């Protein structure tokens, strides 16, 4: 499952997202999170990134969106910066379920 987040961590209910992640990983499902747009801010917050990485959640952030927000140097080391081609590969080749969290 690839969860795509687009809203700021302060505008979203990240607790709900983490609950979905916890349930999916508890069932043995491979889970990854992709931060895009304003959600890239979450890729700079150490505590949640560390907790997710400890639970074997792959974390990605769209590099172009991080650059647009001046966040590239602040992105947590557990988050891999990716380009648009890599995003397509995540969707097409690595995950059979996509959850786009936009509200």
Image (spheres, rainbow, N blue to C red):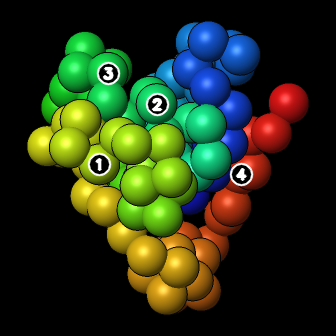
Tag 4's secondary structure? strand
The disc, 2 or 1, on the residue closer to the chain's N-terminal end is 2
Drawn side of residue 62 relative to residue 99, left or right: left
Q: Are marks 3 and 2 in contact (CB under 8 Å)?
A: yes
Q: In the image, which disc is placed on residue 41?
A: 2
Could you say where residue 36 lies in the image, as x and y percent from the top left?
58, 51
Q: Is residue 64 above or below residue 47?
A: below
Identify the image quadrant of residue 7: top right
Q: Are marks 3 and 1 in contact (CB under 8 Å)?
A: no
Considering depth in this image, is 29 or 85 the residue closer to the camera?
85
- Where is mark 4, residue-wise? 99
Callout 2 environment at 10 Å: few (<14), some (14 to 19), or many (20+)? many
Report, in whole angstroms, how far the alpha carbon at label 2 lies from the one at label 1. Answer: 10 Å
The disc, 4 or 1, on the residue closer to the chain's N-terminal end is 1
- Where is mark 1, residue-wise? 72
The disc, 3 or 1, on the residue closer to the chain's N-terminal end is 3
Report, in whole angstroms, how far the alpha carbon at label 4 lies from the one at label 3. Answer: 22 Å
Q: Is residue 23 above or below residue 63?
A: above
Could you say where residue 91 lies in the image, as x and y percent from the top left?
59, 76
- Where is mark 3, residue-wise? 45
Could you say where residue 48 lies in the image, as x and y percent from the top left?
33, 20
């Amino acid at each position: 499952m690839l969860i795509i987040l687009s809203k700021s961590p302060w505008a979203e209910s990240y607790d709900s997202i983490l609950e979905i992640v916890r349930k999916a990983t508890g069932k043995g499902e491979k889970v990854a999170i992709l931060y895009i747009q304003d959600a890239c801010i979450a890729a700079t917050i150490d505590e949640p990134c560390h907790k997710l990485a400890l639970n074997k959640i792959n974390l990605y952030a769209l590099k172009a969106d991080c650059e647009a927000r001046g966040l590239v140097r602040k992105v947590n080391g557990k988050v891999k910066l990716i380009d648009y081609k890599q995003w397509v590969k995540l969707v097409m080749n690595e995950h059979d379920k996509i959850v786009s969290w936009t509200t």
